[in-house]
């Protein structure tokens, strides 16, 4: 069911209606729009008509950029502003828009959701929905806050004990997003109240009532999406019913796959071959459409066609093309994504016939049916005894097992052979507790299911999902008395793990690296778990970044009044408000070689565990090396849109993070980007490069020259190469013929840039390589994937042309410090100013050099007279320098993608879209351009919450100690599919020598400040003959060099100072050296890193 349209928006007054039968309180705030009006406006020709829901161009972005499909003419998509996005605050939701697209976001904005049960799980679900930006979230709970809730609910403080849970939740949830209306219901729900919502979520409800409510939702017209979710200790369950015929518009969120055609046969079936530029991602049975096919034009009718025998670069078309015209050249093939209709069963039927369970851990493939039984048995236990089983009570555990046995015996064909009493005992012991990591994980999963229910985006969970993490329990048996409540905020957690592990958590010394989206979730989790909250505990968090508006849609510890403040400081403060006992120190240091004086040896040696919350691989690799060196556990995780992964790096048990690497991303050849683009990514890569060259690098070079002319020109003369020549040419051009003194000069420059980029360069290209040009082998030069370009004819009536000139002239003026006049905002006046520019006629060059070599790394070509040209340029610069006003400086502009008022993205989108028109490549709007050119990582709160919940389940294991490799879990999950894959980590590679063995985790320590001779003798005792010893990039010893024998009696550390010029800081007590060794049979042996201790 899709949400009903929302009525006109405005300010809604808060109201409290005590006389309401439902005792509902409404906390309503105005929806905030963050977009101002564009400087130039145009008639909106369609209401997002470029988003085709069923074709899934909404997937992961804004519009279908394709791989270079049919040509776009005129001003189909505006480069500046976006008249379709007035209801979406793109500054706030940009990362989420990159995942969902506008159409999904609009549906969310029109959706009302009920969350019933505001313990830990309900709070996590509500948080994720408020961050996502649904229209309204109604919180329902008739219970009051208890100290027990503090283990899992980040909203409550101890001052809230005794208050209604729903009412106590409003203020903090509202702070997350003022645009979402927060309502509360504090009395028992009636079925009729459910009709106000598109989706309802129940986290604490009996099966009997759930069946009754679900029957109502299932039969309602339109159906109301129903979700029942529970977290019971280390066990969790989800059930989804979105109605008898729910339409999924986009099952995976992946943009339609495309291919560039190389040939099509006249056969039945026809063989379609594509260029080997990129592998095809088609699958048998996919539907595809063709465009731009020359010759066999019958395929250009837009009709979807089925394919089979899909291969990496070809497929068979289920069509007889024998009598079609012969294929000549060109063509794009694009996948058509079909909607999918799912027929959900109501809970009443699904309990008896659950169908296939969604698996998470293939080592537990038999677990879901057992947990299906366990949750039914627990419901019956609560109904029968009016309470949960008591933690540690063997009597209650046996009662639960007995109930489960009875249900199983009456299950007919679904009867299980083994009900696993040991597992049911664990289930009974923790049944009352809601643990924070479990709530975080399931809050992410359920939050995503609500988004699916409201939007039709991504494939829903169909229909049951069960999960457990019994491996998180302590290895040693826990005495039943250890589970007893201590009248503290951790009682729920103690009822599962015991008080001894709770003490270990509180005394832990933890380092969280990063306090962005992952870091905020981790800080919340560890605060609730009580990690580093004891007298001996300490949590250190560091992040060198500051808060931006775009962070607020998922980094939930931040508020709009924190924008511009240090992330780590604000996050740490917010975490202490969750748990005042948290001992946290917030730093603003980047973790790297340059801060080893801050994060020194003593700091690393004292840590219990390191948790990465980083957003780049290099930083992860550095922290990994530090953890490897100091033998500290590293808990790693990451997200990408709806995807998330976790990796446990445990000393001596698992391989380290850097042991396996993803292959590097494929980069488009330079000649493709600069002269032969065939998709919008190429155009945007070129646009970003031109932006930085024109507005940042060249002005910076000008300033470098002006600030120290002699040193600068000497450096260029000494370089004497093509790059130096090109740099000087750009500086001279900027200061001489392209120097701007008035805004009209800037308009003149921008207009001529348009002519240069989109007319003259294209004219030169097709003059050098005409449409019928051939390669040296006689093959057509303009064959796929190359696209033959057409020059643009500038027109001030074309809004795309005018937007480009306006953005370029404004930014050019900024670099020269020229004020921008008010009349720029008037399209007619601006167009008149542009039309006054005199544009010289183009004259093609016969000797133009255009790079066509795909292996070329530079567009500059060396010349034998580079030095002479450089000297001439320097003379001209010196003359030009004399004509500059005193104190003249330029203002380089650094690209900033997240400020929609600075015209940066307007210019980049304009550059890319005009270039796309040259090559008949579909254009994109400014937001889509921002995603690609700004290299925005798609991000949503749900996958972040799930990843951190999973990591914290392993944090229990790390801090408890004694767990084996098979107890840990690495996870890959896709919330869109949904798909979960959990497996034990890979062990490290073991090297054996004599009776010794070691792994990458081992480090050999040599104490007492040895000499080189003593070190060689130490190794000899191990049966190792060292033939080379190095420190950094310097060789301290090599057996092949006779002179090195003179070093034998020198201290190794003195050799390092003398030969390698090593400066050892006062806080460092040792020196690391790398030793190459052989055994007695001359076989090379990889030995661990050696640490020489000299203090």
Image: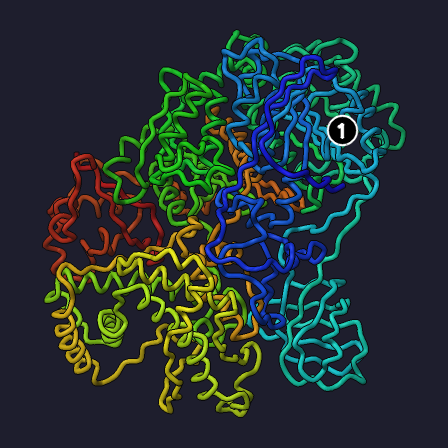
- Indicate how the structure is coloured in the image: rainbow
Residue 154, horizontal then vertical, whole percent: 52, 23
Which residue occupies 48% across, 17% down?
A: 502
Q: Is mark 1 on a helix, strand or loop?
A: helix
Residue 110, horizontal then vertical, whole percent: 66, 39
Task: Determine the image quadrant of residue 580.
Answer: top left
Image quadrant occupied by the C terminus? top left
Residue 306, horizontal then vertical, whole percent: 77, 67
Which residue occupies 17% across, 37% down?
A: 1094
**Front-most of residues 521 and 164:** 164
**Front-most of residues 824 and 1064:** 824
Q: From the viewer's perspective, is residue 294 above or below residue 818?
A: below
**Front-most of residues 483 and 557:** 557
The reply, left or right, for residue 396 in relation to residue 751 is right
Task: Determine the image quadrant of residue 363.
Answer: top right
The residue labelled by disc 1 is 372
The reply, left or right, for residue 272 in relation to residue 1023 is right
Which residue occupies 54% across, 27% down?
A: 174
Please count the marks in the image. 1
């Amino acid at each position: 069911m899709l949400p009903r349209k929302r009525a006109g928006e405005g300010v809604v007054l808060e109201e409290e209606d005590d006389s309401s039968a439902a005792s509902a309180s409404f906390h309503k705030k105005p929806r905030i729009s963050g977009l101002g009006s564009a400087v130039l406006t145009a008639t909106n020709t369609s209401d997002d008509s470029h988003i085709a829901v069923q074709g899934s161009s909404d997937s992961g972005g804004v519009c279908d950029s394709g791989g270079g499909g049919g040509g776009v003419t005129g001003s189909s998509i505006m480069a500046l502003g976006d008249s379709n996005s007035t209801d979406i605050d793109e500054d706030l939701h940009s990362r989420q828009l990159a995942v969902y697209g506008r159409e999904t976001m609009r549906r969310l904005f029109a959706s009302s959701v009920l969350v019933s049960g505001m313990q830990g799980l309900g709070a996590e679900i509500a948080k994720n929905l408020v961050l996502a930006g649904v229209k309204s979230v109604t919180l329902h709970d008739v219970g009051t806050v208890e100290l027990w809730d503090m283990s899992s609910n980040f909203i409550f403080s101890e001052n809230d004990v005794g208050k209604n849970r729903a009412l106590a939740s409003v203020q903090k949830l509202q702070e997350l997003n003022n645009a979402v209306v927060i309502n509360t219901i504090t009395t028992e729900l009636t079925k009729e109240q459910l009709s106000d919502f598109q989706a309802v979520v129940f986290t604490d409800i009996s099966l009997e009532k759930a069946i009754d409510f679900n029957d109502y939702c299932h039969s309602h017209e339109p159906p109301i999406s129903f979700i029942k979710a529970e977290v019971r200790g280390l066990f969790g369950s989800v059930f989804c019913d979105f109605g008898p015929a729910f339409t999924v518009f986009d099952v995976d969120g992946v943009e339609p796959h495309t291919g560039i055609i190389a040939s099509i046969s006249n056969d039945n079936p026809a063989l379609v071959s594509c260029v080997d530029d990129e592998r095809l991602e088609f699958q048998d049975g996919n539907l595809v459409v063709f465009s731009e096919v020359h010759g066999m034009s019958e395929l250009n009718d837009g009709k979807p066609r089925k394919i089979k025998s899909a291969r990496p670069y070809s497929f068979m078309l289920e069509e007889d093309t024998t009598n079609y015209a012969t294929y000549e050249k060109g063509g794009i093939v694009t996948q058509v994504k079909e909607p999918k209709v799912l027929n959900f069963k109501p809970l009443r039927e699904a309990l008896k016939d659950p169908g296939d369970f969604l698996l998470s851990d293939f080592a537990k493939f038999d677990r879901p049916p057992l947990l299906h039984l366990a949750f039914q048995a627990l419901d019956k236990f609560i109904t029968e005894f009016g309470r949960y089983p008591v933690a540690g009570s063997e009597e209650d555990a046996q009662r639960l097992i007995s109930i489960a046995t009875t249900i199983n015996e009456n299950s007919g064909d679904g009867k299980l052979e083994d009900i696993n009493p040991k597992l049911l005992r664990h289930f009974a012991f923790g049944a009352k507790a809601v643990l924070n990591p479990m709530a975080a994980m399931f809050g992410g999963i359920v939050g995503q299911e609500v988004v699916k229910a409201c939007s039709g985006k991504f494939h829903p969970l169909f229909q049951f999902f069960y999960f457990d993490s019994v491996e998180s329990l302590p290895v040693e048996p826990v005495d039943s008395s250890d589970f007893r409540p201590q009248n503290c905020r951790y009682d729920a957690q103690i009822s599962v793990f015991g008080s001894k592990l709770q003490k270990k958590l509180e005394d832990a010394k933890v380092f969280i690296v990063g306090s962005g989206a992952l870091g905020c979730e981790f800080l919340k989790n560890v605060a609730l778990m009580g990690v580093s909250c004891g007298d001996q505990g300490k949590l250190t968090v560091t992040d060198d970044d500051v808060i931006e508006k775009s962070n607020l849609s998922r980094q939930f510890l931040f508020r709009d009044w924190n924008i511009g403040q240090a992330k780590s400081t604000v996050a740490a403060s917010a975490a202490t408000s969750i748990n005042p006992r948290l001992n946290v120190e917030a730093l603003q240091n980047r973790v790297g070689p340059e801060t080893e004086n801050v994060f020194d040896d003593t700091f690393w040696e004292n840590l219990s565990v390191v948790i990465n919350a980083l957003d780049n691989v290099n930083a992860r690799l550095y922290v990994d090396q530090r953890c490897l060196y100091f033998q500290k556990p590293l808990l790693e995780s990451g997200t990408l849109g709806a995807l998330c992964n976790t990796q446990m790096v445990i000393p001596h048990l698992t391989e380290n993070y850097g042991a396996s690497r993803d292959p590097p991303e494929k980069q488009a050849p330079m000649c493709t980007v600069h002269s032969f683009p065939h998709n919008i990514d190429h155009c945007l890569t070129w646009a970003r490069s031109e932006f930085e060259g024109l507005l940042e690098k060249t002005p910076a070079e000008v300033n470098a020259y002006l600030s120290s002319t002699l040193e600068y020109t000497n450096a260029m003369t000494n370089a004497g190469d093509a790059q130096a020549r090109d740099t000087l040419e750009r500086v001279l051009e900027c200061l001489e013929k392209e120097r701007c003194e008035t805004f009209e000069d800037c308009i003149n420059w921008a207009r001529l840039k348009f002519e240069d980029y989109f007319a003259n360069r294209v004219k030169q290209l097709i003059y050098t390589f005409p449409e019928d040009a051939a390669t040296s082998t006689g093959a057509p030069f303009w064959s796929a994937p190359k696209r033959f370009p057409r020059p643009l004819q500038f027109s001030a009536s074309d809004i795309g042309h005018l937007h480009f000139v306006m953005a370029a002239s404004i930014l050019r003026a900024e670099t020269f410090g020229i004020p921008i006049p008010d009349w720029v905002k008037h399209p007619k006046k601006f167009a008149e100013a542009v039309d006054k520019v005199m544009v010289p006629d183009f004259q093609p060059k016969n000797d133009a050099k255009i790079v066509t070599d795909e292996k070329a790394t530079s567009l500059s070509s060396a010349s034998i007279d580079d030095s002479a040209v450089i000297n001439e340029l320097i003379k001209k610069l010196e003359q030009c320098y004399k004509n500059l006003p005193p104190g003249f400086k330029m203002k380089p502009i650094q690209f900033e993608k997240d400020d929609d008022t600075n015209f940066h993205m307007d210019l980049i989108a304009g550059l890319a879209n005009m270039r796309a028109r040259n090559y008949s490549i579909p254009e994109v709007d400014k937001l889509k351009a921002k995603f690609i050119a700004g290299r925005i990582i798609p991000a949503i709160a749900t996958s972040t919450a799930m990843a951190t919940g999973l990591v914290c389940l392993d944090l229990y294991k790390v801090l408890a100690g004694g767990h084996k490799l098979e107890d840990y879990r690495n996870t890959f999950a896709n919330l869109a599919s949904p798909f979960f894959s959990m497996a034990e980590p890979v062990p490290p590679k073991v090297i054996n020598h004599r009776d010794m063995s070691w792994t990458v985790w081992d480090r050999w320590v040599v104490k007492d400040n040895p000499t080189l001779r003593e070190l060689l003798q130490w190794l000899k005792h191990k049966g190792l003959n060292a033939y080379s010893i190095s420190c950094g990039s310097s060789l301290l010893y090599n057996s092949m060099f006779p002179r090195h024998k003179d070093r034998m009696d020198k201290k190794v550390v003195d050799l390092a100072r003398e030969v390698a010029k090593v400066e050892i800081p006062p806080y460092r007590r040792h020196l690391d050296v790398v030793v190459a060794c052989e055994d007695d049979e001359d076989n090379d042996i990889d030995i661990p890193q050696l640490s020489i201790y000299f203090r």
